Amino acid sequence: MSGDKKLALLKEIKRVLRHGGTLYVADFDQPLRPGEIYALRGTGYLFGFDSAQNHADGTWVNFIKQAGFVGIRRVATYSETVGRIAIVRARRA
């Protein structure tokens, strides 16, 4: 998804989530190993550079903050065949 679409989706999730509710997101994260870099580049080729750039530099989590969530933190990251995956937790205030 483009950045605008990611932000719109997160705002809609926040709108329907109860006050104090918790959001968990699993998505590609900043690569730390060469294989993860190549996998993310492939994602960029398939879906467009803009859709992958926020994941390549790790700034995709900022969309969660912009949507109005609080207490945002990465609870886990995993190196998988398709790239590095992060699980992020946030709350609706």
Image: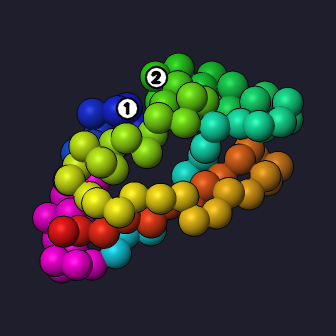
Is residue 79 positioned above or below 63 on the image?
Answer: below
Residue type, mark 1 in image: Ser
Q: Is residue 19 magenta?
A: yes
74 and 82: which one is in front?
A: 74
Task: Label 2, secondary structure: give it.
Answer: helix
Specify the quadrant that holds the N terminus.
Answer: top left
Residue 80, x across and y down, in percent: 79, 53
Residue that label 2 marks: 50
Residue 48, x across and y down, in percent: 51, 23
Residue occupying image coordinates x 78% and y 28%:
38
Q: Which residues are magenta?
A: 10-21
Residue occupying image coordinates x 21% and y 63%:
14
Disc number for residue 23: none
Specify the quadrant that holds the C terminus.
Answer: bottom left
Left or right: where 15 falls relative to 81: left
Is the image coloured rainbow, by chain, by secondary structure, or in one colour?
Answer: rainbow
Is residue 46 positioned above or below 25 on the image?
Answer: above
Residue that label 1 marks: 2
Residue type, mark 2 in image: Asp
**Disc 2 residue crowd, few under 14, some 14–19, many 20+, Cα 10 Å:** few
Residue occupying image coordinates x 55% and y 36%:
58
Residue 27, x across and y down, in percent: 55, 52
Rendering quarter of residue 55: top right
Marks 1 and 2, the one that precedes in the sequence: 1
Regarding residue 42, the answer to whether it shows in the image is: no
Q: CA distance from mark 1 to mark 2?
A: 6 Å
**Disc 1 residue crowd, few under 14, some 14–19, many 20+, Cα 10 Å:** some
Regarding residue 84, the answer to whether it shows in the image is: yes
Residue 70, x across and y down, in percent: 28, 60
